Image (cartoon, rainbow, N blue to C red):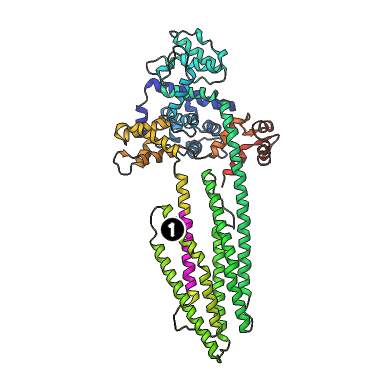
């Protein structure tokens, strides 16, 4: 089982240290609410575990059992908290979970807390880089200790045993806290205690004891977690700078998206109003009592289809483009779908189809009406010759247009290649069809004229303009739909694809772990995944490996690897990330409030005014949690 595999890899000394580190890390968050625990077993009812998750996710959990008594109530509480973590981090705890914590399985509980630490603490060291997290942390530590005597940082174990490396980092940022030159490399215990106490005095939680380092092989995970605390403490200003830069981008995104939504809804409403009015007009309008009135009415109808209707069709295309643009923006920024109530593209299409039905019905009524009028019998030879010319003209145009339609059908059936190639072909066909709209309209005009002269049958051919028009409309609609599908497919592909820099980063990482073999086997793949995730989620890694290795060949190509690495990355700010950005700027983190002074301090006047107008006000402060929740809720 996966559980046993995890536990067997942990030595007694390492587990003891990890347990203590996890306990202190949890208490660091719990003490903000005036609570604490003396053992990880005290998380078993889920209440303190929920408080921990609320703090690290920067968002309260509303519904849970406040007074759990039964085992099931405790499990439910823990599941709520774990599911929140899984949702935010897009991960899945496999074969470990709520039941283990309720049953006070301290080893599994420790592993779960370690996983949370690596997901929420160590991961924040990374932004858009795909270098393993511990490598970046180690690089940072090496840079901070550079130039200090007797300090050589090259790993997360022996490099820290004598305490000098810890002391060097503290001294780098807070020289008055430690007299580094007075430290003796031989006084290991004293060095460690001096470094830990100095760090504690400036606000860094003491997660380790000197005894944890004074063994043959100190636990690298525990050391890494403590160093992460130091890293975050000394990078507060950097985090605030990051928040000051990224939140305005998010504000601009909200503004632009809101404008696009308003524009969409206004356009959709205008189109729906026009369709409703035109549908009612076609239903109620008659053809008059004379042949001339009927013909005049029908010619107006043909003119409407040629001009007024085409303008609305163009607006419908704009509406679809606008909707796709909004959807793409929301998807890239991990926000809920845009659902315009009663004004969706589908609703507009439904109303449009009703209008088309009324158009066809009106055409049928016209031809029936024309049959009721008496036929003109006396036609002089000159008129007869002219009508004959018109019939032959109709025959030539109808035959040419029919050949064009058949050729277009063939072209559509032969489209092949990549998405971009297909789109180029379909665009050319769709453009050609739109350009030939005049031809079918001319045929309809000519047919109406001939029918008005009581010429129903044409001995030169059997084509009927309305039938040709139906084929034309089918091809036009099909090509337009295919163009839309291919455009969306290409956009989706671009969203999923990696830019050059990211591809290079993945390729470098892949080549590093594949070595001379050129491909990753299961062992090197697991090692690589471990490096990306800090080594804490072995169970999750196994599920990824099982999922990706569909052929059970034991070999993982670069595409598989890139797919997985992408799941570790963020394309843009998620709900959790936005909350964290505000969290960096706010003093009242517990309630999720930002003050008027903080808004003025960190934002431009324009963005500050926007936040004041949109964030719910509570007494004299502004609740950023409620605002962000409203943006990301369906």
Compared to 66, does 222 lie above or below? above
The answer to whether residue 425 is seen in the rendering is yes
123 or 147, nearer to the observer = 147
Q: For mark 1, give the secondary structure.
A: helix
Compared to 138, does 542 lie above or below? below
Any magenta on residue 476?
A: yes
Q: Position of residue 319 (x, y in %)?
A: 57, 56
Q: In the displayed structure, does residue 86 sit left or right of residue 620? A: left
The answer to whether residue 589 is seen in the rendering is no
Q: Residue furthest front?
A: 382
> Crowding near pointer 1: few (<14 within 10 Å), some, many (20+)?
some
Circle 1 residue:
425
Q: Main secondary structure of the magenta part?
A: helix
Any magenta on residue 203?
A: no
Span of residues in magenta? 468-486
Q: Residue at x 46, y 70 (%)?
A: 471
81 or 406, nearer to the observer = 406
Q: Position of residue 283 (x, y in %)?
A: 61, 73
Q: Specify the quadrant of the image occupied by residue 19.
A: top left
Q: Position of residue 367 (x, y in %)?
A: 54, 80
545 or 128, nearer to the observer = 128
Q: Position of residue 353 (x, y in %)?
A: 54, 66
Q: Specify the quadrant of the image occupied by residue 214.
A: top left
Q: Quadrant of the N terminus?
A: top left
């Amino acid at each position: 089982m996966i559980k046993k595999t995890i536990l067997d890899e942990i030595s007694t000394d390492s587990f003891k240290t990890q347990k203590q580190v996890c306990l202190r890390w949890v208490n660091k968050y719990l003490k903000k609410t005036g609570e604490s625990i003396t053992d990880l077993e005290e998380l078993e009812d889920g209440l303190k575990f929920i408080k921990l998750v609320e703090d690290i996710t920067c968002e309260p959990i509303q519904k849970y059992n406040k007074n759990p008594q039964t085992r099931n109530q405790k499990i439910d509480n823990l599941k709520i908290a774990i599911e929140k973590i899984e949702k935010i981090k897009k991960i899945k705890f496999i074969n470990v979970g709520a039941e283990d914590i309720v049953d006070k399985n301290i080893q599994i509980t420790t592993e779960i807390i370690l996983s949370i630490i690596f997901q929420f603490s160590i991961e924040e060291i990374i932004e858009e880089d795909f270098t393993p997290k511990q490598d970046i942390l180690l690089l940072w530590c090496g840079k901070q200790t550079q130039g200090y005597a007797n300090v050589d940082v090259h790993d997360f174990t022996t490099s820290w045993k004598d305490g000098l490396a810890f002391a060097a980092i503290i001294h780098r940022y807070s020289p008055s806290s430690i007299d580094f030159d007075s430290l003796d490399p031989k006084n290991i215990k004293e060095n460690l205690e001096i470094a830990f106490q100095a760090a504690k005095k400036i606000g860094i939680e003491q997660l380790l004891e000197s005894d944890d380092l004074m063994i043959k092989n100190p636990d690298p995970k525990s050391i890494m977690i403590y160093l992460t605390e130091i890293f975050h403490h000394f990078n507060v200003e950097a985090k605030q700078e990051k928040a000051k830069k990224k939140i305005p981008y998010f504000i601009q995104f909200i503004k632009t998206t809101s404008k696009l939504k308003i524009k969409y809804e206004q356009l959709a409403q205008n189109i729906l109003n026009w369709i409703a009015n035109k549908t009612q007009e076609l239903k109620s309008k008659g053809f008059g009592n004379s042949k001339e009135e009927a013909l005049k009415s029908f010619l107006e109808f043909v003119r409407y289809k040629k001009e007024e209707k085409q303008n609305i069709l163009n607006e419908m295309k704009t509406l679809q483009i606008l909707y796709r643009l909004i959807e793409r923006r929301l998807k890239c920024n991990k926000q809920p779908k845009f659902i315009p109530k009663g004004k969706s593209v589908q609703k507009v299409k439904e109303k449009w189809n009703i209008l088309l039905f009324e158009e066809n019905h009106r055409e049928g009524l016209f031809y029936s009406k024309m049959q009721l009028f008496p036929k003109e019998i006396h036609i002089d030879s000159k008129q007869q010759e002219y009508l004959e010319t018109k019939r032959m003209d109709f025959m030539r145009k109808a035959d040419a247009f029919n050949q064009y339609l058949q050729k277009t059908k063939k072209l559509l059936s032969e489209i092949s290649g990549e998405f971009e190639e297909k789109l180029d072909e379909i665009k050319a066909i769709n453009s050609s069809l739109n350009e030939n709209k005049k031809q079918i309209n001319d045929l309809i005009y000519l047919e109406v004229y001939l029918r008005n002269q009581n010429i129903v049958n044409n001995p030169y051919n059997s084509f009927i303009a309305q039938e040709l028009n139906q084929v034309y409309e089918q091809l036009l609609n099909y090509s337009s739909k295919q163009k839309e599908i291919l455009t969306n497919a290409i956009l989706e592909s671009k969203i999923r694809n990696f830019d050059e820099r990211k591809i290079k980063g993945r390729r470098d990482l892949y080549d590093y772990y594949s070595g001379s073999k050129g491909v990753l086997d299961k062992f090197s793949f697991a090692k690589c995944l471990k490096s990306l995730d800090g080594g804490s989620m072995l169970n999750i890694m196994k599920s990824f490996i099982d999922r990706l290795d569909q052929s059970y060949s034991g070999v993982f190509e670069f595409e598989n690897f890139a797919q997985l690495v992408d799941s570790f990355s963020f394309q843009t700010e998620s709900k959790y990330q936005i909350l964290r950005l505000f969290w960096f700027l706010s003093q009242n983190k517990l309630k999720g409030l930002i003050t008027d002074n903080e808004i003025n301090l960190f934002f431009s006047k324009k963005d500050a005014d926007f936040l004041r107008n949109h964030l719910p006000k509570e007494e004299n402060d502004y609740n950023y949690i409620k605002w962000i929740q409203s943006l990301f809720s369906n």
